[in-house]
């Protein structure tokens, strides 16, 4: 009953992953970088669910479940660190955070 | 699935679960310690700088060690977790490091200088230990991912623990951003591998790869993506960007912890992945048989290139460093390169050489960072320039640091020499002479910057001898306890070598 | 072109367009709201793939949790009155490197997707995945399930510690 072939889903996820990586590599606002990372994780989830559906193997969906758990934890920790930095330095821009060399 | 089927599934799983619980005592002890440390912290909250949960963690580690001594071996939890000699060896490295780090923390002025809540610090270290225990035994990609994330999540927070110091929260932020990106790349690789083989268990992947024809370029790309995620953890070039900044910004104890324990756990999983998923094992394999690689993907070359890059960049950049923590960061990148040589060999001799190296590296690196911490406690600086005359101000620190530096360089009669000897022998036995030559040349370069530390301590600033640094008795005892293995393992190394050889074999083949 | 195709393209266009807005928009609030549509589109694709449980979880965790968290982050780190919300890109060199490496990455992925014969099993008609997921979580994947609870507790303790003033 699957009429859309697997490759289409994979291509969609590849495009989403690439867009996310553009964001991580070129933006300077750290919140946007976090959003881009979430998009990358979403594209991974998309691949896993697609494979899982076409393989008839629920393991992929379980992996997605765990990736979501970790993503939520990572977002919480990342934003907490961002807040701590903002308090001491009043900036969230990557290029203004330069006490240590990149 | 109807209720009847569920019932059958449940009862068939129950036996496996009961068996698994027996194999899982050390980890259970760690989780209990983790929870106890939180509870104890709640009751001692109004007394800042209270070391109570620290002591609880130490006792917990001790109990874990007892369980680890008597641990049976086998596969557990429906084939997701292997308890074998290989993982137990790495668990010992992680456990000893965690124990030593908590002891170090008691002496850190950086951590105890302010009225800081320290309960969470110990809790996070115990949690991170749990993550690394899981990582050294994980045989399922889901568990590998979760274990890596447990380890990373705690290290992100620990790196920024002194959050009012700007460079610590900066370091922590960079760590999170790079870490999250690299783990994203890693799970993309995992998802491709899942699509290729239809399995998330390493044994399932191995069986499918052995029996079926898969596109080997896809296999290569997914493998590289996974290795990128692990390479980040072991700070191999080109995934090392975060290392100098995080090592410089984090509290010294955490820097030492990251440079030893999380690196060891990363190597454990890298070796297990290559061995269990990507290579074929015949029944008659001996310790010297090279693993035959699946689908002609040349993992040896990939790992060897990473190794050469890490050694060369680490050593050459370390030469220019003026901050001792940064210098040790680049030195740890270089050491990741030496250890990767052992991985590139891809046989059990290489694995056992890596284990010997990591065990020795643990003692020398912890020692070096302990001296850096004690010096920073007294002179509030980690600058190489400020180290002038330390050898005269405190001969204890000077001599100890020199021994650790000699050991890190790999000169006899210290333990570092034995570590290097076994890795180089493994490389030469496998016929990769060019790799061994590059390794030796790199060791020569490393001599230069290790000597630079020695020169600043002893050959300069003799006039500062009238400002002696007084060390307490406990600090001296710890220094001696760290010096002893560095010397003793250089002379009586038979026991360690036998243990490593016996532990190199993995259950899952 | 049948209905499933149309639905797929509909969600795919939503995902790609909103993801592009997230990355390219100059206003961080636009980015945050655009991310809502990306998450929503991905949930739609999950439904198309018969992954009902994951689709609902996607809505609850990503939109209900992570997105709200991100918007809080935006609000807490920008002076609401000052409206200092510059989000421009970094230097040209980084832009070029970023673009180039993304091209390489995207190209490789597309090549891989088109050239690989993926593992395929005879299509199993699935009704609901909730049962299978639930059973697996408590049998084959019991250990990851428990490890995830430790991870969440760690993250909670850590986030509270770091975000707290002093």
Image: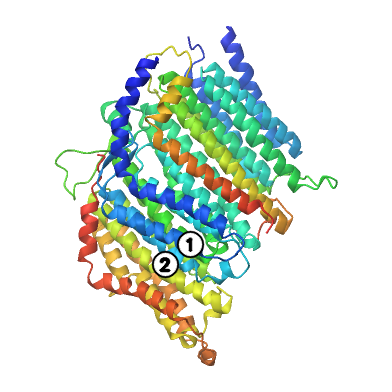
Nearest to the eye among marks 1 and 2: give it: 1
> What SS does tag 1 mark?
helix
Quadrant of the drawing holding the C terminus of chain C? bottom right
Which quadrant of the view contains residue B281? Answer: top left
Furthest-top residue in this view: C2
Q: Are marks 1 and 2 in contact (CB under 8 Å)?
A: no
Residue drawn at x 34%, y 42% as measured from the top left = B273
In the figure, is residue B461 to the left or right of C69?
A: left
* Image spot of residue B90 (x, y percent): 33, 53
Neighbour class for label 2 at 10 Å: few (<14), some, many (≥20)? many
The residues tagged by marks 1 and 2 sit, at their Cα atoms, a distance apart of 19 Å
- What chain letter is assigned to the residue under label 2? B
Instruction: Quickly name the residue at label 1.
Output: B54
Where is B214 relative to C122, above or below? below
Neighbour class for label 1 at 10 Å: few (<14), some, many (≥20)? many
> What SS does tag 2 mark?
helix
In the figure, is residue B504 to the left or right of A72?
A: left
* Image spot of residue B280 (x, y percent): 24, 37
- What chain letter is assigned to the residue under label 1? B
């Amino acid at each position: 009953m699957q009429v859309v072939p697997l490759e289409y889903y994979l291509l969609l996820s590849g495009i989403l992953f690439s867009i996310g990586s553009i964001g991580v590599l070129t933006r300077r606002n750290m919140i946007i970088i976090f959003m881009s990372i979430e998009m990358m994780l979403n594209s991974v989830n998309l691949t896993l669910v697609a494979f899982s559906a076409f393989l008839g193997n629920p393991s992929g969906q379980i992996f997605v479940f765990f990736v979501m758990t970790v993503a939520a934890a990572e977002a919480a920790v990342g934003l907490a660190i961002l807040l701590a930095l903002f308090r001491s330095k009043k900036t969230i821009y990557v290029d203004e955070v330069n006490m240590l060399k990149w | 699935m109807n209720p009847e089927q569920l019932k059958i599934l449940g009862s068939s799983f129950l036996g496996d679960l009961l068996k698994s619980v027996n194999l899982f005592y050390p980890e259970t002890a760690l989780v209990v310690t983790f929870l106890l440390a939180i509870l104890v912290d709640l009751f001692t909250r109004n007394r800042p700088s209270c070391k109570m949960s620290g002591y609880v963690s130490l006792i917990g580690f001790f109990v874990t060690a007892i369980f680890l001594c008597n641990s049976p071996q086998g596969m557990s939890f429906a084939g997701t977790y292997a308890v074998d000699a290989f993982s137990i060896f790495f668990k010992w490295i992680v456990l000893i490091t965690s124990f030593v780090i908590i002891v170090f923390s008691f002496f850190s002025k950086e951590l105890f200088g302010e009225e800081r809540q320290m309960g969470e610090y110990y809790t996070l270290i115990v949690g991170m230990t749990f993550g690394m225990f899981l990582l050294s035994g994980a045989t399922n990609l889901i568990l590998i991912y979760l274990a890596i994330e447990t380890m990373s999540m705690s290290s992100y927070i620990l790196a920024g623990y002194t959050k009012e110091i700007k460079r610590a929260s900066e370091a922590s932020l960079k760590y999170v951003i790079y870490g999250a990106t690299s783990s994203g790349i890693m799970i993309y690789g995992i998802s491709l591998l899942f699509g290729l083989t239809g399995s998330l268990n390493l044994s399932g992947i191995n069986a499918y790869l052995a029996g079926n024809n898969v596109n080997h370029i896809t296999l290569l790309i997914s493998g590289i993506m996974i290795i990128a995620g692990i390479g980040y953890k072991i700070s191999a070039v080109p995934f090392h960007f975060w290392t100098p900044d995080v090592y410089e910004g984090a509290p010294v104890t955490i820097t030492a912890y990251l440079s030893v324990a999380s690196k060891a756990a990363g190597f454990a999983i890298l070796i297990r992945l290559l061995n269990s998923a990507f290579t074929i094992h015949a029944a008659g394999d001996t310790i010297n048989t090279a693993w035959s690689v699946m689908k002609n993907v040349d993992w040896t070359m990939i790992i060897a290139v990473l190794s050469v890059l890490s050694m060369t960049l680490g050593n050459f950049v370390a030469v220019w460093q003026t901050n001792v923590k940064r210098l040790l960061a680049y030195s740890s990148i270089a050491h990741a390169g030496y250890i990767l040589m052992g991985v590139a060999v891809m046989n059990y001799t290489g694995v056992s050489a890596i284990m010997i190296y990591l065990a020795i590296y643990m003692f020398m690196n912890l020692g070096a960072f302990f001296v850096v911490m004690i010096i920073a406690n007294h002179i509030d600086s980690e600058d190489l320039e400020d180290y002038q005359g330390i050898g005269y101000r405190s001969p204890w620190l000077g001599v100890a640091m020199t021994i650790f530096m000699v050991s890190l360089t790999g000169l006899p009669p210290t333990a570092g020499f034995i570590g290097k000897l076994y890795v180089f022998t493994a490389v030469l036995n496998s016929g990769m002479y060019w790799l061994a030559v590059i390794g030796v040349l790199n060791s020569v370069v490393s001599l230069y910057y290790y000597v630079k530390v020695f020169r600043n301590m002893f050959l300069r600033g003799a006039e500062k001898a009238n400002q002696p640094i007084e060390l307490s008795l406990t600090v001296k005892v710890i220094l001696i306890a760290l010096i002893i293995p560095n010397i003793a393992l250089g002379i009586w190394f038979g026991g360690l070598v036998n243990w490593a050889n016996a532990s190199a074999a993995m259950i899952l083949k | 072109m049948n209905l499933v195709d149309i639905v797929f393209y509909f969600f795919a266009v939503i995902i790609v367009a909103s993801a592009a807005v997230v990355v390219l928009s100059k206003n961080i609030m636009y980015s945050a709201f655009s991310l809502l549509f990306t998450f929503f589109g991905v949930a739609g694709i999950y439904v198309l793939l018969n992954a009902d449980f994951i689709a609902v979880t996607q809505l609850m965790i990503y939109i209900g949790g992570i997105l709200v968290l991100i918007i809080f982050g935006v609000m807490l780190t920008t002076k609401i009155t000052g409206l200092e919300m510059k989000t421009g890109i970094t230097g040209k060199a980084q832009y070029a490197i970023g673009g180039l490496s993304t091209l390489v990455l995207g190209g490789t992925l597309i090549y891989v997707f088109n050239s690989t014969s993926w593992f395929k099993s005879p299509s199993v008609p699935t009704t609901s995945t909730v049962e299978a997921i639930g059973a697996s979580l408590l049998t084959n994947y019991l250990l990851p399930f428990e490890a995830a609870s430790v991870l969440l507790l760690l993250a909670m303790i850590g986030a509270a510690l770091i975000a707290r003033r002093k």
